Image (cartoon, helix red, strand yellow):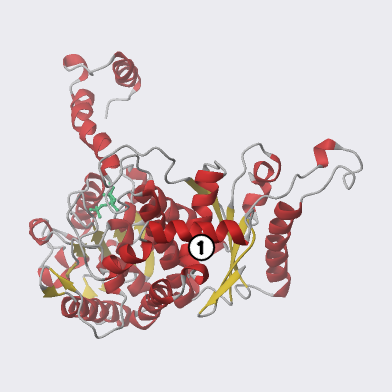
């Protein structure tokens, strides 16, 4: 029960499953037409049915010379043009040939949220040992503290802002971008265009914001936000690690793509991940899935995975428009090891909810032998304790010290965290999420569930402005608004 692909070992030998159950699950995958759906995705068919869009993040990392057609047009030339434009820009920033008011760029601030933040932030942080350019910072929240706490340490004359937004309408991002422009403008005067660049599919809006086309990097509607790090949204990462290593990152993902396309289902890492997830969610009834990277720099991996998995598969309506009758996407959470061990692993070992876990582990990494061996042995000790547990007899009759065991986990093992390895790991998770969406019959590529809250903001914001003149549509929200209006300090 382990599969190796290109230096990444997926070990699933600590699961509550046997060969017979697995082969039945493979049958389910075949009957769900997983292979046909996978091929349709890679071929550019409009499998995102509710938005009538193709799903082609895989084309962004393809090294093949074959055409990929969308609406009768080969998209590969445009992808390559944009990648070359990004590489030139990243190189010019890293070398200092791109000059801002104060000369060479020392700090880059990526302003974006969701997919325009989580992927670039997580990967840039995870690959800090590959960093070679200016310092990277990330701002997402509309809480002003997010931007303020970063810019207070920066020199506006050597800072470059990347406004990353597929739509270029996301309220938080546009507010932060306007505030960043004010911050630079107040310090340097009004002509601050050179301190800003944009990553977006909405060129009209980037121009209206005052960012010229030569500093705007585009992508396309067939790139979903949470799958967009492989596109121009990866510019911050490229500036940090350099275009060559960015290509290796794409290459790692491409290796996972080829594996997903070509490996038989019973030896296919994302397919096995997906089937185990379905087994636990739908047959065993476990609602949660945890992910534990034993790597401090990968602390944002769980947050990245939360968006990928929960925004994709947290759905109740099937592609056929009917309500689902079975459970879909699990709750994802996680924390780096060993920190999590001293916090919530208690529940994973002895709680009443069984939580399947993924452990991510590098054989080599930061620091010397003592740190490394402690990290590795802790990770293996946890997976063993979860699997084997401890009997009442072994616990000398003390029921509080009994571990029932049989608690499932997978372990991803690799030599070290490199752009190639991380790209591959991320793509495995992307394909797992896609495969589960197919098995559940849902569209993993839309996100209508985020819209209602955004709409209600437009009703509520004016009530904060105008005090008691407007009223909420329900007494609960009204009560909170009254309390807020009474408590808040005049600004
Ligand atoms: O609100 C959800 C969402 O649309 C995500 O799917 C997306 O990654 C994020 O907002 C940011 O969107 P944008 O890149 O258009 O600013």
Direction right: furthest residue: 396
Quarter of the picture holding the C terminus: top left
Task: Please state the horizontal and vertical placement of residue 357, each as a whole percent of the image.
Answer: 59, 53
**Residue, x 56% and y 52% (percent of image)?**
335
Task: Please state the horizontal and vertical placement of residue 9, each as a whole percent of the image.
Answer: 57, 73
Direction bottom: furthest residue: 65
Quarter of the picture holding the N terminus: bottom right
Picture quadrant of residue 376: bottom right
**Can residue 108 be seen by looking at this rendering?**
no
**Residue, x 36% and y 39% (percent of image)?**
324
Task: Please state the horizontal and vertical placement of residue 362, each as a whole percent of the image.
Answer: 60, 71
Q: Which residue is mark 1?
A: 272
Of residue 471 and residue 387, the one placed in the foreground of this image is: 387
Left or right, 451 with respect to 440, comes to left
Q: Residues within 10 Å of mark 1 (few under 14, many from 20)?
A: many
Image height of 489 relative to 362, above or below: above
């Amino acid at each position: 029960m382990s599969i190796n692909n290109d230096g990444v070992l997926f070990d699933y030998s600590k699961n509550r499953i046997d060969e017979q159950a697995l082969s039945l699950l493979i049958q389910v995958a075949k009957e769900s037409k997983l292979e046909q759906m996978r091929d349709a995705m890679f071929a550019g068919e409009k499998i995102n049915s509710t938005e009538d869009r193709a799903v082609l993040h895989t084309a962004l990392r393809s090294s093949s010379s074959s055409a990929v057609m969308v609406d009768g047009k080969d998209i590969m030339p445009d992808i390559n043009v944009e990648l070359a434009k990004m590489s030139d820009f990243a190189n010019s920033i890293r070398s200092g040939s791109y000059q801002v008011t104060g000369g060479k760029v020392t700090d880059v601030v990526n302003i974006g949220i969701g997919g325009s933040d989580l992927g670039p932030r997580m990967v840039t942080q995870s690959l800090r040992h590959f960093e070679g350019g200016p310092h990277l910072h990330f701002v997402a929240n509309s809480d002003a503290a997010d931007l303020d706490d970063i810019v207070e340490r920066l020199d506006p004359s050597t800072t470059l802002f990347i406004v990353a937004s597929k739509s270029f309408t996301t309220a938080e991002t546009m507010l932060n971008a306007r505030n960043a422009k004010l911050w630079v403008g107040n310090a340097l005067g009004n002509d601050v265009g050179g301190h800003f660049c944009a990553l977006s599919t909405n060129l009209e809006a980037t121009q209206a914001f005052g960012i010229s086309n030569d500093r705007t990097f585009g992508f396309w509607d067939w790139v979903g936000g949470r799958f967009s790090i492989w596109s121009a949204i990866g510019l911050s990462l490229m500036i940090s690690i350099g275009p060559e290593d960015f290509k290796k990152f794409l290459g790692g993902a491409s290796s996972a793509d080829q594996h997903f396309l070509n490996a038989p289902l019973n030896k296919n890492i994302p397919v096995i991940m997906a089937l185990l997830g379905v087994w636990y969610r739908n047959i065993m009834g476990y609602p949660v899935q945890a992910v534990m990277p034993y790597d401090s720099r990968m602390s944002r991996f769980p947050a990245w995975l939360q968006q990928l998995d929960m925004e994709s598969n947290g759905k109740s309506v099937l592609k056929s428009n009917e309500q689902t009758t079975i459970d879909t996407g699990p709750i994802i959470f996680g924390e780096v090891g060993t920190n999590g061990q001293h916090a919530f692993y208690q529940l994973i070992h002895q709680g009443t909810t069984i939580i399947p876990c993924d452990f991510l582990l590098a054989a080599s990494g930061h620091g010397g032998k003592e740190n490394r061996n402690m990290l590795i042995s802790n990770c293996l000790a946890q997976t063993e304790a979860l699997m084997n547990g401890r009997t009442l007899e072994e616990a000398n009759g003390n029921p509080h010290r009994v571990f029932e065991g049989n608690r499932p986990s997978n372990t991803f093992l690799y030599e070290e965290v490199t752009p190639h390895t991380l790209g591959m790991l991320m793509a495995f998770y992307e394909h797992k999420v896609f495969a589960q969406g197919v098995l559940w019959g849902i569209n993993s590529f839309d996100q209508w569930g985020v819209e209602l809250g955004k709409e209600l903001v437009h009703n509520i914001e004016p009530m904060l402005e105008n005090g008691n003149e407007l009223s909420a549509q329900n007494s609960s929200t009204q009560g909170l608004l009254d309390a807020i209006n009474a408590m808040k300090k005049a600004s």
